[in-house]
Image: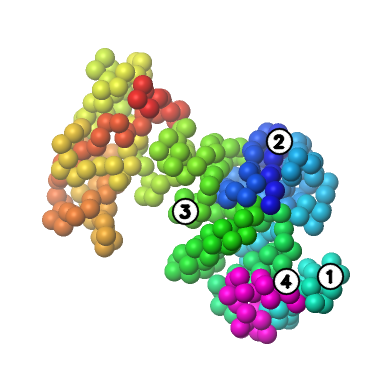
């Protein structure tokens, strides 16, 4: 286990700055997830922590020690990649034990560690097979096994599940959560999948253009995003952003409702409301939505349509079997669940928020 501190971290490729002045503390034994759009620097940052990518400026500290110039082995971190990178000619057993053989561990010690890792990952009966004889999920377990045997201070995962089908992703996600509970090791995990981020993380770090937009618990990022970018990135389907302006009465949505919030006079506002915070046929702050498409998902359904302002809208409607495409339905929301943003995307907090 170990604590990791990133201090004023910079990374440039030539004149192109990929990571700029990044500061982050990762607690000992925590599960931290990096999310952000493609190209924002997630893999680069992970590789800098791992020791696979030279650092242009700032420090990576593990348990207080500057490790900028240390090798991955010296740092005590192990990385698991998206493409597994298993040796095709070696058996599962040999793949898992490879780094220990390289590090000149004794035969008995290697056998014990491999057997223990295989037990944890429930792949004991696959040890004699070659990677080509495994399913995607099994290969992923072997890749994790290779990291586990090294007994690292920290595990770094770069989109480890993105090659798996939807069902397998869910079960491997649960396996990774169990593994974290069992090993208690610090884990840093990069993903595009925001369900993975929400369910696995103690702390989610939302990145954009090589910088942190916001870092916090899933609940804080979901309920109290610092800006429109984070609000739009966390949550699926995405938060609705509706045009509004401030008046003496409060925030007036182009769609009609008025939020009784004192906001200083600004004409270009956005009001964010999550699909699940709408109440179909609700009483408060309501307007009519024209429904274009009804998406039925079993336990719930999503209505896709337009507000009276012509703005597109996604609304979650539970238990409402009678709504059909082409209908007009009144939708409402609780004013205190609506978030207000400036035209540039900064959060405007009201007294209650
Ligand atoms: N060796 C390199 N030389 C120059 N630019 C690079 C190099 N490696 C990465 N980059 C650039 O750095 C930026 C960040 O890349 P990175 O791989 O960290 O993104 P990412 O957030 O992991 O994206 P994705 O979600 O697509 O995996 C990108 O613009 C990329 O093109
Ligand atoms: Mg990447």
Query: Which badge, 2 or 3, is on the more N-terminal residue?
Result: 2
Give the class, few, some or many, for how many residues have Cα within 10 Å of label 1's Cα (few <14, many ≥20): few
Q: State yes or no: discs 1 and 4 in contact (Cβ < 8 Å).
A: yes
- The span from disc 1 to disc 4 (Cα, nearest Å) is 10 Å
Q: Is residue 315 above or below residue 286?
A: below
* Residue at image mark 3: 199
Label 2: which secondary element:
strand
Label 2 to label 4: alpha-carbon separation: 35 Å
Q: Is residue 278 visible?
A: yes
* Left or right side of 271 for 71: right
Whichever of callouts 1 and 4 sits on the residue coming sooner in the sequence is 1
Magenta region, main secondary structure: helix
Q: Are marks 3 and 4 in contact (CB under 8 Å)?
A: no
Give the mark nearest the N terminus, 2 or 4.
2
Displayed quadrant of residue 133: bottom right
N-terminal label among 3 and 4: 4
Q: x, y (%) of residue 199?
A: 47, 53
Decide if residue 102 is on the left or right side of residue 146: right
- Circle 4 sits in a helix, a strand or a loop, which is it? helix
Question: Is residue 20 shown in magenta?
Answer: no
Say what secondary structure mark 1 lies in: loop
Q: Nearer the viewer, mark 1 or mark 3?
A: 1
The answer to whether the residue labelled 1 contacts the one labelled 3, judged by CB atoms less than 8 Å apart, is no
Instruction: Identify the residue position indicated by label 4 in the image.
Output: 113
Quarter occupied by the C terminus: top left
How far apart are labels 1 and 3 at the CA level? 37 Å
Q: Which residue is mark 2?
A: 7
Give percent across and percent down for residue 216.
52, 39
> Residue at label 1?
105
Mark earlier in primary sequence (1, 3): 1
Q: Which segment is the magenta one?
A: 111-133
Residue at image point 53% right, 65% down:
175
């Amino acid at each position: 286990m170990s604590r990791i501190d990133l201090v004023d971290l910079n990374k440039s490729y030539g004149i192109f700055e990929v990571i700029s002045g990044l500061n982050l503390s990762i607690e000992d034994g925590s599960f931290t997830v990096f999310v952000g759009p493609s190209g924002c620097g997630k893999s680069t940052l992970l590789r800098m922590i791992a020791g696979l990518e030279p650092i242009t400026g700032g420090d990576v500290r593990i348990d207080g020690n500057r490790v900028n110039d240390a090798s991955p082995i010296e740092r005590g971190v192990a990385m698991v990649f998206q493409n597994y990178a298993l040796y095709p000619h070696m058996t599962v057993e040999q793949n898992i034990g490879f780094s220990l053989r390289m590090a000149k561990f004794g035969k008995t010690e290697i056998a014990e560690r491999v057997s223990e890792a295989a037990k944890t990952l429930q792949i004991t009966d696959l040890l004699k097979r070659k990677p080509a004889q495994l399913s995607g999920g099994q290969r992923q377990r072997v890749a994790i096994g290779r990291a586990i045997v090294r007994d690292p201070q920290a595990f770094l995962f770069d989109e480890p599940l993105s090659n798996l089908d939807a069902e397998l992703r869910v079960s491997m996600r649960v396996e990774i959560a169990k593994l974290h509970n069992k090993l208690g090791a610090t884990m840093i995990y990069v993903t595009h999948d925001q369900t993975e981020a929400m369910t696995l993380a103690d702390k989610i770090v939302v990145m954009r253009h090589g910088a942190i937009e916001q870092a916090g618990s899933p609940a804080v990022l979901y309920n109290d995003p610092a800006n429109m970018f984070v609000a739009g990135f966390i949550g699926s389907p995405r938060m609705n952003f509706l045009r509004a302006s401030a008046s003496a009465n409060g925030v007036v949505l182009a769609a009609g409702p008025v939020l009784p919030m004192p906001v200083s006079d600004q004409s270009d506002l956005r009001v964010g409301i999550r699909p699940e915070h709408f109440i179909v046929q609700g009483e408060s702050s309501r307007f009519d939505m024209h429904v274009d498409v009804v998406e039925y998902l079993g336990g719930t359904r999503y209505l896709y349509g337009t507000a009276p302002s012509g703005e597109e809208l996604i609304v979650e409607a539970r238990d409402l079997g009678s709504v059909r495409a082409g209908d007009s339905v009144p939708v409402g929301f609780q004013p205190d669940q609506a978030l207000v943003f400036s035209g540039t995307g900064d959060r405007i907090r009201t007294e209650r928020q």
